[in-house]
Amino acid sequence: MAYDPNNIFAKIIRGEAPCFKVYEDDHTLAFMDIMPQVEGHTLVIPKEGAESIFDLSPDGAAAMIKTTKKIAAAVQEVTKAPGILLAQLNGAAAGQTVFHIHVHVMPRYHGIDLKIHAAAKADFEKLKALGAKIAAAVK
Ligand code: AMP
């Protein structure tokens, strides 16, 4: 499948759609997932237009993981979660629903299951406040 430049994350990168941004640099962007599977669920994307790991350049992949490391630390600092799950889905069969590559950063706790993937929208005021705390914790 060819990369669709009108997917929602491409629109967020271009500033044509809103997001609760937590971090941005020349090559990557991180923002709150609006249908979080757990409180603190954050997404990291490269700005390069790539659908999945298969068409992302090595430099794009390096930038994505570098930012993921920063965001994982900030999410853990804010949520105090004992575990942080990183997930990256390639292809609809793997569960991918937005076809611009991204890494999910999700706090995990013993005995607490994740909510269903991309199912229910969060309270946007709470998401904004949490996003601001995570943004302030990025080093
Ligand atoms: P995936 O299924 O791995 O492609 O995940 C896509 C993720 O993007 C899901 O967790 C959705 O909740 C999330 N999502 C979809 N639209 C938006 C949006 N406009 N802003 C933030 N997150 C979104």
Image (cartoon, rainbow, N blue to C red):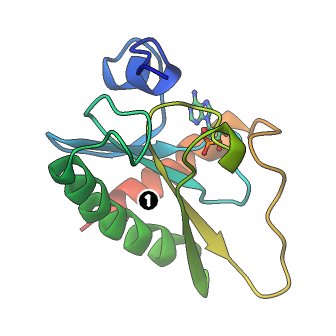
Would residue 43 be found to the left or right of residue 110 on screen? left
Q: In the rendered image, is residue 64 in sight? A: yes
Q: Is residue 80 visible?
A: no
Q: Quadrant of ligand 1?
A: top right
15 or 5, nearer to the observer: 5
Q: At x 42% / y 19%, what residue is drawn?
A: 2
Image location (x, y in percent) of residue 118: 74, 40
| Quadrant of the snapshot with the C terminus | bottom left
Residue at (63% x, 41% y) in the render = 96
Disc 1 residue lies near ligand 1 with CB under 8 A: no
Amino acid carrying mark 1 in the image: Ile
Which residue is pictured at 77% across the width and 48% down the height?
117
Up the image or down, 56 lies above or below 78; here it is: above
Residue 19, position in %: x, y? Answer: 48, 30
- Would you identify the image quadrant in which residue 95 lies? top right
x, y (%) of residue 12? Answer: 41, 23
Label count reads 1
Which is nearer the eye, 126 or 93? 93
Q: Secondary structure at mark 1?
A: helix
* Residue 11: quarter of image: top left
Relative to 63, 6 lies left or right: right
86 w.r.t. 28: above or below: below
Q: Pointer 1: what residue?
A: 134
Instruction: Give neighbour class at mark 1: few <14, some 14-19, many 20+ (Cα, 10 Å).
Output: many
Q: Position of residue 87 (x, y in %)?
A: 56, 62
Task: Residue at 27%, 34% (x, y): give it.
Answer: 47
Q: Say which of 126 and 83 sits in front.
A: 83
